[in-house]
């Protein structure tokens, strides 16, 4: 996909983590200049990776739990190169907490990061994106297939899918497309050691026989931001190796 997004500028939130890092790298590989967002993570390392590969990137720190910080992030991203063409709302958290005993504060902590930040960034981006611009939320297969201990996470991801559809409806007349990408289990360093049973069960159940890679999610995001997806909006692109095609009965 080299050159597919040449001359474009993309903002990736939560880009200091594994999936966000992979997304930023794939946008750079496609020719886009990349605004790498992080809250407390090392965005400098991601910027250095993109630059070393011949791409162009800048890092911006922002606390997306603050509405004004979301607006500042989008504003500075657009000012960097005088334009902003694509936003990927990837920032998120995934704590494990049984629904029984979960506090409202624990619920809000997940919803605020996973859902409210995407709402704020999307609203701000809609003010600067041109016709043909795009927003992509990183949702999850858990938005439609919940897992134990993830009630707050699954609810936030389901809401992201519906937010994207609602935003697609309202922003479509302005030429702005809004979609979601729903990854399955994405590999990271140490995952097999931390959760050997889960990795083994996933690998056995997935028709393609492997975990996902951050680059798999990045490729889906690049596609949705590209001219190849110019008539795709309000949709959820599932990137899960086929796991959700398996019967559950």
Image (cartoon, rainbow, N blue to C red):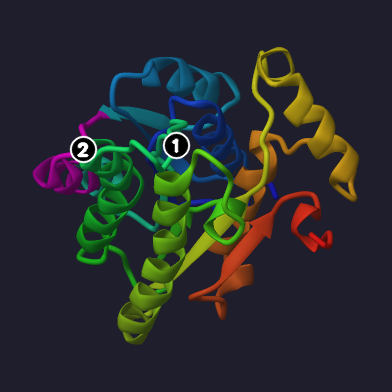
Q: Nearer the viewer, mark 2 or mark 1?
A: 1
What is the magenta segment's predominant secondary structure?
Answer: helix
Mark number displayed over residue 105: 2
- Per the model, the C-alpha gap separating discs 2 and 1 is 14 Å
Q: Is residue 167 visible?
A: yes
Helix, strand or loop at label 1? It is loop
Mark number displayed over residue 241: none
Relative horizontal placement of residue 173, taking residue 55 as reference (left or right): left
Which span is picked out in magenta? 61-75
Q: Is residue 87 visible?
A: no
Helix, strand or loop at label 2? It is helix
Q: Pointers 2 and 1 in contact (CB under 8 A)?
A: no
Q: Identify the residue at image location x=20%, y=58%.
A: 124
Relative horizontal placement of residue 119, taking residue 225 as reference (left or right): left
Q: Position of residue 181 (x, y in %)?
A: 56, 56
Mark number displayed over residue 98: 1
- Up/down of 215 relative to 161, above or below: above
> Residue 101 lies in magenta, yes or no?
no
Q: Identify the residue at image location x=69%, y=21%.
A: 195
> Residue 65 lies in magenta, yes or no?
yes
Nearer to me, 112 or 67: 112
Q: Identify the residue at image location x=50%, y=45%.
A: 32
**Total number of numbered labels?**
2
Relative horizontal placement of residue 236, taking residue 73 as reference (left or right): right
């Amino acid at each position: 996909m080299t050159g597919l997004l040449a001359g474009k500028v993309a903002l990736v939130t939560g880009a200091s983590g594994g999936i966000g890092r992979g997304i930023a790298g794939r946008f750079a590989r496609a020719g886009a200049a990349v605004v790498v967002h992080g809250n407390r993570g090392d965005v400098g390392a991601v910027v250095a990776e993109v630059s070393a590969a011949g791409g162009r990137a800048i890092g911006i720190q922002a606390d997306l739990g603050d509405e004004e910080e979301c607006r500042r992030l989008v504003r500075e991203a657009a000012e960097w190169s005088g334009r902003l063409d694509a936003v990927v709302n990837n920032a998120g958290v995934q704590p494990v907490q049984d629904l029984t005993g979960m506090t409202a504060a624990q619920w809000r902590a997940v919803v605020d990061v996973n859902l409210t930040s995407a709402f704020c960034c999307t609203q701000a981006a809609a003010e600067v994106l041109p016709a043909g611009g795009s927003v992509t939320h990183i949702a999850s297969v858990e938005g439609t297939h919940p897992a134990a201990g993830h009630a707050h996470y699954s609810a936030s991801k389901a809401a992201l899918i519906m937010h994207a559809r609602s935003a697609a409806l309202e922003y479509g007349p302005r030429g702005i497309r809004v979609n979601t990408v729903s990854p399955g289990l994405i590999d990271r360093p140490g995952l097999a050691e931390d959760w050997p049973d889960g990795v083994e069960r996933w690998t056995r159940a997935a028709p393609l026989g492997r975990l996902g890679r951050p680059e798999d999610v990045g490729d889906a995001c690049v596609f949705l931001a590209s001219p190849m997806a110019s008539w795709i909006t309000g949709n959820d692109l599932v990137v899960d190796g086929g796991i959700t095609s398996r019967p559950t009965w």
